[in-house]
Image: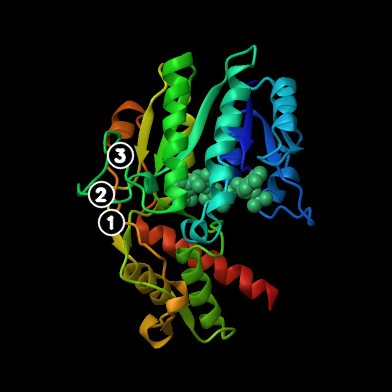
Amino acid sequence: MKKAILSGITGQDGSYLTEFLLDKGYEIHGLVRRSSQTLRNRLDHLRNSSLGDKLHLHYSDLSDTPTLRRIFKKVQPDEFYHLAGQSHVGLSFEMPESTVKEVANATISLLEICRDLSKPVRIYHAASSEIFGKVSSEKQDENTPMFPTNPYGCAKAFARQMCQVYRESYGMFVCNGILYNHESPRRGENFVTRKITLAAASIALGIADSLELGNIDISKDWGHAKDYVVAMWKMLQTENADDYVIATGKLHSLQNVLEVAFNEFDLNYEDYLKINQKFYRPAESFKLCGNPKKAEVHLEWKRSYSFKEMITEMCRSDFKNLKSQL
Ligand code: NDP
């Protein structure tokens, strides 16, 4: 039985990856930080399932290197998926220092811990399309130069480069997954897609009457988190570690998200949308659209969700949850 450690197990990707790996027969060790509540909405269904005894949670903040080292030494994992960190681009302008500490510095600490392990571990690092930032090419791939335009992107660019350094200098098996935006019903509520699907469902149920957004003149390459965690696993099953862009290769505007979400409830978004300057960012990312060709060929990775299916699934899930609380 393979053992995997996951940082960020309580997040959107961590929960889907846990489901996927448990199903493959892995023993999972998740790193969780202490909070005042022990409710872990995205994981509780797994902890209470028949596979729950293969899921172990360990307390450790990313800043707590001695504890992390102790857990890694004890578990001796075959694979490590590093997903934890402040993941919100807009918030990274408000808290740049902690974002950089969590995203960049913690990654070095974890690479160092893994370097010292007696048994080699295969590492997945969650890089991001935000490393590309100011792009001039219509589509980006693994060879596109990095030009981040926000604190989060800068920290991810640094961490990606450090992973390459450890791979090339110490021969460690470290893969960078350069993932474009991916969403799901488990997406955090302060991310724009989820904010929209929640608002549309709330308006349909009569518990809200408007939605406030900032700049809606943006387009993104949006895929489904469930498809993207499969790519993470596939990267660690290859012969040689490498970097891979994981994307849909298609841009959709925020208006597209609004249309699909509100149409699901026979509503017109223009009747409810208010623009609020408060939500504008100091700098918006350029139109980031990925070319996933390398992953499709080398990893035989293929996505299964369309953009419309994903937004519709999110709307239906939000509607069902909100209705059950009425
Ligand atoms: P989430 O925000 O849903 O989850 C982040 C996870 O990191 C949570 O488990 C969170 O714990 C944990 N975490 C944050 N800070 C700390 C800390 N100081 N110590 C310990 N744990 C911490 O992110 P996603 O699942 O969406 O993304 C996973 C990774 O992929 C992230 O690194 C993100 O930056 C990256 N990524 C995501 C993309 C996306 O579109 N989703 C695109 C590209 C990259 P807690 O539950 O306690 O808050």
Task: State whether residue 231 appears in this view.
Answer: no
Identify the residue at image location x=47%, y=22%: 166
Q: Amino acid at mark 2?
A: Val
Q: Secondary structure at mark 3?
A: loop
Residue 287 numbered tag: 1
Q: Amino acid at mark 3?
A: Pro
Residue 292 numbered tag: 3
Q: Position of residue 90 (x, y in %)?
A: 47, 61
Q: Which residue is at the far front?
A: 97
Image quarter of residue 205: bottom right
**Is there a contact, CB below 8 Å, between mark 1 and mark 3?**
no
Identify the residue at image location x=36%, y=48%: 148
Ligand 1 neighbours mark 2 (CB distance < 8 Å): no
Q: Is residue 67 left or right of residue 280?
A: right
What is the CA distance from the residue labelled 1 to the residue labelled 3? 16 Å
Judging depth in this view, the residue of 96 and 60 nearest the camera is: 96
